[in-house]
């Protein structure tokens, strides 16, 4: 009887180990998803970050509707311009916000 109880607890321990391993595999064990930083895509001074759009939004580059599931658009951290993922690397105008701060604080202006 003691062997049976012991073997059951070993089975439970194996199941619990497998469960905790799967949580670690998906990053849930240490809340890795909560600490994930957004990747910045820099184009013409714009600092684009993938963004979940909660309201109907049109691309400020091609003027088409931005739709999809998840992070459908890219928003500039400086000027807040919103574009398609496919359009972010085609933006031709410099970011007025980031561009100005680079001109003011740029290396060529440092003493």
Image (cartoon, rainbow, N blue to C red):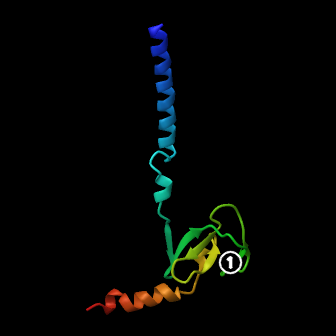
Count the marks.
1
Q: Nearer the viewer, residue 108 or 19?
A: 19
- For the C terminus, the image quarter is bottom left
Q: Is residue 24 above or below residue 64?
A: above
**70 sits to left or right of 48:** right
Q: Which residue is mark 1?
A: 59
Residue 106 in picture, x, y percent from top left? 36, 87
Q: Is residue 41 above or below residue 36?
A: below
Quadrant assignment, res 93: bottom right
Q: Nearer the viewer, residue 36 or 63?
A: 36
Residue 90 in picture, x, y percent from top left? 60, 78
Residue at 50%, 65% in the rendered image: 38
Residue 16 in picture, x, y percent from top left? 49, 31
**85 sits to left or right of 107:** right
> Label 1 crowding class (10 Å Cα cut-off): few <14, some 14-19, many 20+?
some
Residue at 48%, 14% in the rendered image: 5
Q: Nearer the viewer, residue 15 or 38?
A: 15
Residue at 50%, 87% in the rendered image: 97
Residue at 71%, 77% in the rendered image: 58
Badge 1 marks a residue whose secondary structure is loop
**42 sits to left or right of 85:** left
Residue 12 in picture, x, y percent from top left? 50, 24
Quadrant assignment, res 64: bottom right
Quadrant assignment, res 65: bottom right
Q: Nearer the viewer, residue 26 or 45?
A: 26
Q: Residue furthest top?
A: 1
């Amino acid at each position: 009887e003691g062997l049976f109880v012991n073997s059951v607890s070993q089975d439970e321990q194996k199941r619990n180990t497998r469960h905790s391993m799967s949580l670690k595999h998906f990053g849930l064990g240490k809340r890795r998803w909560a600490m994930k930083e957004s990747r910045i895509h820099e184009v013409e001074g714009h600092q684009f970050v993938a963004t979940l759009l909660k309201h109907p939004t049109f691309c400020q580059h091609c003027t088409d509707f931005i739709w999809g599931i998840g992070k459908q658009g890219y928003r500039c951290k400086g000027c807040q311009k919103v574009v398609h993922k496919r359009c972010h690397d085609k933006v031709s105008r410099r970011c007025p916000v980031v561009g100005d701060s680079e001109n003011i604080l740029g290396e060529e202006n440092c003493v």
